Amino acid sequence: MTNPLFSLASLALVSLVTAAVPGPSIFLVMRLAMRRGRGPAMMAALGTFAGCVLWCAAAALGLAAVLVAAPWLYTLLRIAGGLYLVWFAVQLWRAPQEAQDGEAAQPAATGGAFWRALIVCLTNPKSVLFFGSIFAAYMGPDSPLWVHGAAVAIVCTTCIAWYAAVAWFFSTSRAAASYARAQKPLDRVAGALMGAFGVSLLWVFD
């Protein structure tokens, strides 16, 4: 029988590597950090963390098995998520050139960052399959209850730690100054990447 502590240590490493893989959530947090500052970026990190918690709960409740058993539901979720990301990409592509503090001055910017990050995280139904596969690989039916709780805690802690670090690093004065010098090209690169993620979700016949 595999040592539970060894399995949890392996899970921590896998979770960290997975969190570091570029995706729409990371690009959103990076852009908010450079454009609006640390506060909204940290709220976006919390929104992404909330999405991870919800996907973990869905995986634990067996949603991954439901999506596998009902491909039409998975396809529907992918289409909805893909359309949202494509729409978001268009907004990024068309974002006007403006001073960095112009958007930060909006009264609802911080709360809006949380909800936008949450939606971006939840628009990828592949996440629940990922979490489901992780829990299946690292938690057996005979695993103690504390192992299940520790596994969820490790995944969620890794998520918030990574995104908070990204928010902090890219909200430094040097990163903000770099963004201010090349705002339009960076927005369009971010929009193109978001669009690519959206199109990958819409490609439902792969």
Image: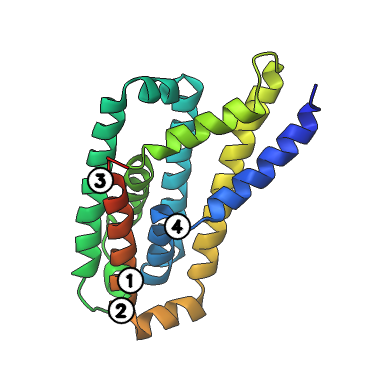
Name the amino acid, label 2: Pro
Does residue 144 appear to the left or right of 79 in the view shown?
A: right
Q: CA distance from mark 2 to mark 1?
A: 6 Å
Q: Earlier in the sequence, mark 4 or mark 2?
A: 4
Residue at (81, 27) in percent of width and height: 3
What amino acid does circle 1 point to?
Answer: Val
Vertical side of 140 occupied by 26: above or below: below
**Mark 4: amino acid:** Ile
Mark 3 and mark 2: Cα distance apart in space: 25 Å
Q: Earlier in the sequence, mark 4 or mark 1?
A: 4
Indicate which label's residue lies in the foreground, 3 or 1. Answer: 3
Q: Residues within 10 Å of mark 3 (few under 14, many from 20)?
A: many
Residue under label 4, please give it: 26
Q: Residues within 10 Å of mark 2 (few under 14, many from 20)?
A: few
- Residue to which mark 3 is pinned: 202
CB contact under 8 Å: marks 3 and 2: no
Quadrant position of residue 64:
top left
Give SS at disc 2: helix
Q: Nearer the viewer, mark 4 or mark 1?
A: 1
148 in relation to 182, above or below: above
Q: Residue at x 59, y 26 (%)?
A: 136
- Per the image, label 4 sits on a secondary structure element best described as helix
Q: Amino acid at mark 3?
A: Leu
Question: Which one is nearer the viewer's eye here, 66 or 170?
Answer: 66
Question: What residue is drawn where x is 28% and y is 72%?
Answer: 188
Q: Which residue is at 41% across, 53% downward?
A: 25
How far from the left and from the top, in percent, is residue 20? 55, 56
Which label is found at residue 185?
2
Please give the label number shown on residue 189. 1
SS for callout 3: helix
The span from disc 3 to disc 1 (Cα, nearest Å) is 20 Å
